[in-house]
Amino acid sequence: PVPLDLVRRGVRPNVQGLLQIVVDTTGQVKSAILVQRIHPSYDPLLVAAAKEWKFEPAMKGGKPVEYVKRIAVNLTLND
C-alpha cells in the first residue's frame, strides 16, 4: 500500500530515486546508498534489493576492477 503521508502530499504512484553503488571485482554490489531518496518506508528496501544485484565487473588492463555506478530507480506505488 501507498504510505498515507504520500497520499496526503499528493505524491503520484510513480516516483524515482537515485542509487549509487560500488561494484567489486566479482560483479557483486559492495555498497549501495540512495543519493535521491524516495520515502523512508521504501528507501531501506531499495538499498537491500540493490545489494542483491549482480553486474559484469569493469575491466582495466585486462583485469577486473571495482567501480562506482549511479542508477535511476523507478518505483510504482500501488493503492
Image (tube, grey):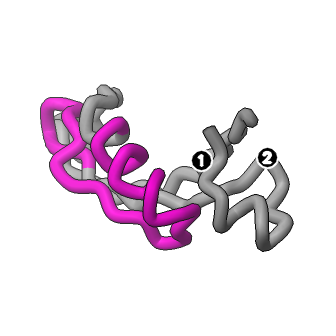
Q: Are marks 2 and 1 in contact (CB under 8 Å)?
A: no
Callout 2: 10 Å neighbours few (<14), some, many (20+)? few
Q: Relative to the observer, which residue lies in front, 47 or 58?
A: 47
Nearer-N-terminus badge (2/1): 2
Residue 24, which numbered label? none
Side of 11 relative to 16 (left or right): right
Residue 13, which numbered label? 2
Q: What kind of element bears circle 2?
A: loop
Q: Residue at x 45, y 65 (%)?
A: 40
Q: Residue at x 18, y 38 (%)?
A: 64
Quadrant containing the N terminus is top right
Q: Residue at x 21, y 55 (%)?
A: 31
Any magenta on residue 43?
Answer: yes
- Residue 65 visible (yes or no): yes
Quadrant in the rendering for residue 75: top right
| Residue occupied by mark 1 | 73
Looking at the rendering, the stretch of residues picked out in magenta corresponds to 23-49
Side of 15 relative to 53 (left or right): right
| Mark nearer the viewer, 2 or 1 | 2
Q: Residue at x 29, y 56 (%)?
A: 32
- Residue 58 visible (yes or no): no
Examine the rendered structure and indicate whether residue 52 appears above or below residue 66.
above
- Residue 53, percent from left and from top: 33, 30
Callout 1: 10 Å neighbours few (<14), some, many (20+)? some
* Amino acid under disc 2: Pro
Quadrant containing the C terminus is top right
Q: What kind of element bears circle 1?
A: strand
- Label 2, label 1: how many angstroms apart (C-alpha)? 13 Å
- Residue 44, percent from left and from top: 34, 54
